[in-house]
Image (spheres, rainbow, N blue to C red):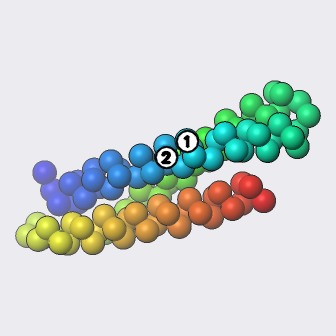
């Protein structure tokens, strides 16, 4: 397995639980807020599903083009830095998406 593939898989395995954790933490308060703002129950369900889609696509978009380029003879710490740099991109995109969605 190439170093790029290993780093990408580790980034993927760390990013998906981050997205699922964010959805789990914010979905219930978002539903309560939407029920108070949107009168139609179908609208509440629609906007909550859109939130899930936005978060998942944001994470997948952030990891689709990873910002690292690893050579064949890399040390473990270079994998760590590559994954950390990828997670930085994931968190930046998630923060921007959540701010735009809740605005």
Horizontally, residue 20 falls left or right of residue 79, namely: right
> x and y percent of residue 79 in the render?
21, 66
Residue 103 image point, x, y percent: 78, 59
Q: Which residue is mark 1?
A: 24
Of 51 and 4, which appears nearest the observer?
Answer: 51
Q: Residue at x 27, y 53 (%)?
A: 10
Secondary element at image label 2: helix
Residue 8 place in picture, x, y as percent: 29, 55
Q: Is residue 61 visible?
A: yes
**Residue farthest toward the right in the current orientation of the protein:** 39
Q: CA distance from mark 1 to mark 2?
A: 5 Å
Locate residue 71: give its quadrant. bottom left
Outermost residue on the top side: it is 42
In the rendered structure, find residue 21 and report the number of the disc placed on it. 2
User: Are there few (<14), some (14-19), or many (20+) residues within 10 Å of tag 1?
Assistant: few
Q: Residues within 10 Å of mark 2 (few under 14, many from 20)?
A: few
Query: Residue 63 occupies which quadrant of the picture?
Result: bottom left
**Against 40, is 33 above or below?**
below
Determine whether, in the image, residue 30 is placed left or right of residue 5.
right
Residue at 14 percent of width and 67 percent of height:
76
**Residue at figure coordinates x 91%, y 34% from the top left:** 39
Q: Is residue 6 left or right of residue 38?
A: left
Q: Are marks 1 and 2 in contact (CB under 8 Å)?
A: yes
Residue 24: % across, % down: 55, 41
Q: Nearer the viewer, residue 23 or 6?
A: 23
Instruction: Indicate whether 16 appears above or below 87.
Output: above
Q: Nearer the viewer, residue 97 or 67?
A: 97
Q: Using the rendered image of the protein, determine whether residue 53 is visible from the camera's viewpoint.
A: no
**Residue sitting at x 45%, y 51%:** 18
């Amino acid at each position: 397995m190439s170093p790029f593939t290993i780093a990408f898989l580790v980034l993927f395995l760390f990013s998906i639980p981050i997205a699922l954790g964010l959805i789990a933490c914010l979905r219930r308060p978002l539903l309560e807020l939407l029920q108070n703002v949107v009168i139609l129950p179908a609208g509440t369900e629609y906007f909550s599903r859109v939130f899930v889609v936005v978060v998942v696509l944001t994470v997948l978009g952030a990891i689709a083009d990873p910002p690292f380029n690893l050579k064949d003879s890399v040390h473990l710490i270079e994998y760590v830095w590559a994954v950390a740099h990828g997670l930085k991109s994931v968190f930046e995109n998630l923060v921007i998406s959540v701010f735009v969605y809740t605005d």
